[in-house]
Amino acid sequence: MLEKIDLSKTMDKPEFKTRMRELDAKLGRLQRLCKEKQIPVIIVFEGYGAAGKGTMINRLIEPLDPRGFKVYTTQQQTEEEKYYPFLWRFWNMMPGKGRISILDRSWYRILLNDRFDGKTSDKSLATAVDEINSFEELLTDDHIVLIKFFLAISQKEQKKRFKKLADSKETAWRVTEDDLKRCKHYDEYSRLVEEALEKTDRDNAPWTIIEAENREFAAAKIAQSVVDRLEEALEDAEKREQEPKVSPEESAQIHTDTFRASALAGVDLTKSLEKDEYQKKLKELQKKLSKLHGELYLRRIPVILAFEGWDAGGKGGAIKRLTQALDPRGYEVHPVASPNDLEKSHHYLWRFWTAVPKAGHIAIFDRSWYGRVMVERLEGFCTENEWRRAYKEMNHMEESWVNSGAIVLKFWMHIDKDEQERRFKERQENPDKQWKITDEDWRNRAKWDQYEVAVDEMLVRTSTTYAPWIIVEANSKYYARIKVLQTVIDAIESRLKDNE
């Protein structure tokens, strides 16, 4: 892409001032409109060292309301960030609806500087490209405006700028040994840039190359590009508002199908365990899990456990028997309810990405991201397009976690309708358990058949080799708790053996 770029393009100062007066006015207006329409914007700045990213960002934000944007500078990973999945820190930079995030370098560092410095292996390169493309597709599918700039200058111009910076006491600190090394090996670094741009230039997230040798031309082109993309995003938003509204019932798309794949139909719910045997096994397994938790920490292996299931299916009881064996400093349980206002302002996966555990720790989710294809789908809280693409999005998210070294297990706590009714009534009659039963539980029960179809589809489409679903026969609470404990232990022991 870069070899065809004419870096000699310039713009004189009078023309620049005239153009920027008009563009600045548009940028201020478009920021306000994006806020009104709740459109989030991400602007990524990449480029050669000394290409002027900081200068261009400063010029771009001049006409913007500072309360509506935030600028992030992406340096090398800190020691803390290394304990999390590659994309974790960028999910923490995601803008809420109507806000703008501006990134001075971004997730492309792994394909550029880190790769040049030998920190990105050939094996992890392909994985990183796939994760980046999937990540950007997920963002743009959710109507987040993603604008990517690469600022290009020649090696000659780069040397000149580095010299000017190094010759001044005030700016010499900005030129590092790594900068000079990349400048010296400009052609080699440029080859990596070309490859990264080619592999990640897609219709949903195209690159805009900025000829950055003339600062006036570069600033004007960046401003014009942002104006064009924001105007396009606002037009798209207007079109979506004009589209016919689909009822929750139509969006849910629940049909009885004789030939549908079913994961639940063959589950043997008669499996059980006597109390004496349960107590014996519980003690043995909790002792083993406690020991394994220490090994997880020493070897820095993160574990992510998601619990889904029918209301009163025993999620809480199974989680409690797990955590009784764990060091409280090394795990966190996340009870997942309806999203709050902050969570609603972000992508639906944001609250789960920001809660992933650091290496060596355990995250347990009591309900999870799969609410999108169950309750949100059936109650009409998301569109058909949103829940249909969610299967792929969640698979990619879990794969990204596994690629970073995590163990990911997902449990479906399965009971039959009669057992659920028995447990509901028991809760109603027990003053200490009445808080566990709500009107919503009974409403959900009335949609049992619809939920069963949705659950079957979810299990079939999102049980993967790297993040499998484990269906737990939970009519017997004793049996269910032991199965969960044993499954977690087996997965940890298997990983520890593989890492020997």
Image (cartoon, helix red, strand yellow):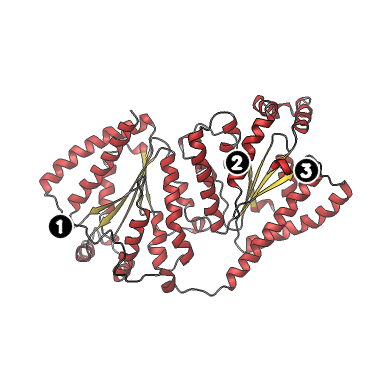
Residue 205 x, y percent position in the rendering = 60, 52
Q: Residues within 10 Å of mark 2 (few under 14, many from 20)?
A: some
Frontmost residue, 204 versus 368: 204
Q: Residue at x 49, y 51 (%)?
A: 350
Q: Nearer the viewer, mark 1 or mark 2?
A: 2
Q: Is residue 470 left or right of residue 166?
A: left
Q: Residue at x 41, y 36 (%)?
A: 359
Give the residue type at disc 1.
Thr
First-in-chain label (1 vs 2): 2
Q: Nearer the viewer, mark 3 or mark 1?
A: 3
Kind of residue sitting beneath label 2: Ala
Using the rendered view, name the quadrant where residue 442 is placed.
Answer: bottom left
Q: Residue tagged by mark 1?
A: 270
Residue at the spot of label 3: 6
What number is the disc on residue 196?
2
Q: SS class of the residue under badge 1?
A: loop
Which residue appears farthest toward the right when viewing the image? 14
Q: Position of residue 56 (x, y in %)?
A: 73, 44
- Quarter in which the N terminus is drawn: top right
User: Badge 3: few (under 14), some or many (20 or more) residues near its Cα, within 10 Å?
Assistant: few
Residue nearest the viewer, comparing 249 with 254 = 254
Horizontally, residue 294 falls left or right of residue 61, namely left
> Residue 287's quadrant in the figure?
top left
Q: Amino acid at mark 3?
A: Asp
Whether residue 83 is visible here, answered yes or no, is: yes
- Quadrant for residue 439, please give it: bottom left
